[in-house]
Image (spheres, rainbow, N blue to C red):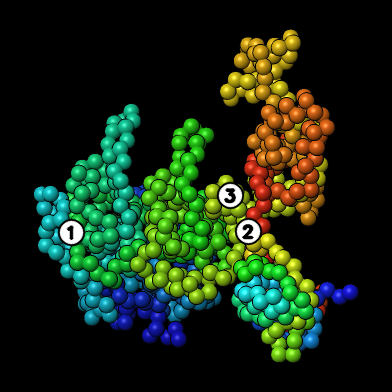
Amino acid sequence: MPVPTMVKSSNLANYRGREVMAFGKVLSNEGKVMSIELCDGGRVTVRFPDVTEASPESKVEIQGRVEGDGISIAGMQLIHLSDDTDMKITSKTIDVLENWMADCFDFEK
Amino acid sequence: LYDGRYLCLHPARKHILPDISGYHPICQINASRHTADPNSDSQRYKVLLSDGINVTTSIFIGEDCANKLVSEAKKFSVIRVDNSHIQRVNEGRKALIIVGFTVLEQLDAKIGEPTKLDPSTVKEEVPAPIHNNNAMTSPQIRNGSTGGLVGMTPSASQVQPITSLNPYQNKWLIKARVSKKSDIRTWSNARGEGKLFSMELCDESGEIRCTGFTEAVDRFYNVVEQGKVYYISRCNLKTANKQYTNVKNDYEMQMTNDTSIVRAEDDESVPEVRMNYTQIADIDKVEPNAFVDIAGVATQIGDVTNITSKAGKELTKREIKIQDKSGAAINLTLWGNDAINFDSSLPEPVVAVKGAKVSDFGGRTVSVSFNSTLMVNPDIQHSHELKGWYMKEGRNQDVRQLSGSQGGGGGSMETAVKSFVDAKASINEAKPEYFSNTCVLTFIKKDNCMYKACPSADCNKKVTQEGESEYRCEKCNRSYPNFDHRLMMNAKFADSSGVEWITLFQENAEKLIGKTSSELGALKESDEEAYERALDTPLFDKFTMKIRGKLETWNDETRIRMSALHVEQPDVIKECERLLSEISMF
């Protein structure tokens, strides 16, 4: 099973219809719909099929499919990260993976 | 080009000016030889200069001229004289003294058939100079009884640049700013006692050090202020002793009984301090113990810490990490009052140091020494540019750490990060290698990792049991009813390059295990299984360590021995930043 590509808000639109992995902080949670601030500061709306627990300000990893509008994700899985997860480092790491290891990962330019 | 019109000592060609300053004549070197100067150790060359029509003897002085004459300015080179003056020598004759020149071109033969200039044909005409501010007439200063700030204010037309000063001049005047003034220092030895102070002077051309002894201290110390501009004359000029200064000048000044120092109006043309910046990224190539001028934004400011030197002296220090536009950061160490007085509440201040000393202790670090000048948020253009750059983009820039990833905070990890393989390659017989490494603990040698130690303070020697409750220490030469458990552990660690045995002593071993030696000792005596489990607990955990590796010979066998000097839990964020930085530099 292929590993979902790690994305940020800046390149989310390049992966419409594809399964991705994103990291960020929960801004608000209305049960099935969450607003997440991704690691590069951009905001994305994530819709889950069921009520998903995640308190505001908590750090999470989202796996899901990018919707046609390019700015929202149909969430499939949410993983809680520790509060001291550094989003700046995460964002830089995704840049490194995209710039230096594009052959190893399925990045779209 | 070289038809005689452009190749000239003077536009009228047959004259030697009484004042050549302001002109930059182009001429050809026909011959040169090194001469010994009985008055000083400075480099001095006699050079035959030609303008294609006549030749004249000139004196080239200074290290810069000497280096160029040896390396670039061969016979028949065409040069441009950048810095020179006319000096009256014996019997009223004049000598052309050159302190700076540029090689324009190397030719294979002399131009024309120049003949020796007959001094009797020299006319004392003085054409209109290009720059009317460097005439070498006597300064109009009268030295008052106080020898200090009295007398007529000299005029700007009498001032000459600092870089033109040399011991062959009798009368000169400079206008310079006191960029640094030292405290009064005293000495007392078999030959007597005395006091001195020194100051660094700078103008737009360069800088020079000036020292006053004993009486000069009384006359001038309290009247000269750092940062102010003065007219100064009548000091002795001698070859600079580079051991005591890193000021970039072959000469230095010594005050005399005739020295005159007159306050001048503050002139923006006189720089506040003369900096010749070295980019932080280039400090890698600078030799240890050299001095550099640096400036950077302080991204981390450590606390003041106290350490005891090998001589038993209590020292105070503070470490600051500074970063500049070159994409590198380095640790700057402040000592004593500089460390104490540094305002750590300032948000990311610009720190500039003139004459920072370079060290190779763990990669590269710099420190503020006795001869350095420390400036925080100085009001100079370079500082404002740095701050602007940092606020705009520098803050988010990936940086290469010259001083190791864990430096700058508490100041305990002042070493370069190296893998085991790289560190071992650097170890030689001359000195041990200090480095940092984040590695995984894979094995602890449990046998003999603890011993029974003398309970007296600071002894720690192994005791021998003589009775049921009697333990003898040979070092203290007495017996005790009890002992302390102490740890001396050999453990195996692995990083990406390989595996190494590392020795850990008491404190570091306790940090590794997470228990004190007393607790472990009690466990060992009461519950052997729990003791074994305690030693297994940290296996395959990651630790960041400062390690010393050195070559040791035992039974004719030379091996590398590594010991841990400091152990701590790795700072994941700092480690990630370091790795990301290394990858981006790849």
Identified by mark 1, the residue type is Val
Q: Position of residue A15 (x, y in %)?
A: 76, 85
Front residue of this view, candidates B424 and B460: B460
Label 1: few (<14), some (14–19) or many (≥20) C-alpha neighbours in 10 Å: many
Judging from the image, mark 1 belongs to the subunit labelled B
Residue at the image position 48 percent from the left and 55 percent from the top:
B301
Tell me which chain the residue with mark 2 is part of: B
- Real-space Cα distance between discs 2 and 1? 54 Å
Q: CA distance from mark 1 to mark 3?
A: 47 Å
Where does residue B471 sit, x and y in percent of width and height? 69, 14
Counting residues from the N terminus, which is met first, the one under dot 3 or under dot 2?
A: 3
- The tag on residue B574 is 2
Circle 3 packing at 10 Å, graded few (<14), some (14-19), many (20+), is many
Check the image and report above or below for B493 versus B51: above
**Residue identifier under label 1:** B262
Chain under label 3?
A: B
Q: Nearer the viewer, mark 3 or mark 2?
A: 2
Question: Where B470 sits versus B2, above or below?
Answer: above
Q: Which residue in the protein does label 3 denote?
A: B414
Furthest-bottom residue in this view? A68
Looking at the image, which residue sits at the far right?
A1
Q: Amino acid at mark 2?
A: Lys
Image coordinates of residue B53 in percent, x first then y, are 38, 79
User: Which of the two discs, 1 and 3, sits closer to the camera?
Assistant: 3
Q: Nearer the viewer, mark 2 or mark 1?
A: 2
Provide the secondary structure element on which disc 2 rests: helix
Q: Are marks 1 and 3 in contact (CB under 8 Å)?
A: no
- Mark 2 vs 1: CB contact within 8 A: no
B238 or B532, nearer to the observer: B532
Figure quadrant of residue A56: bottom right
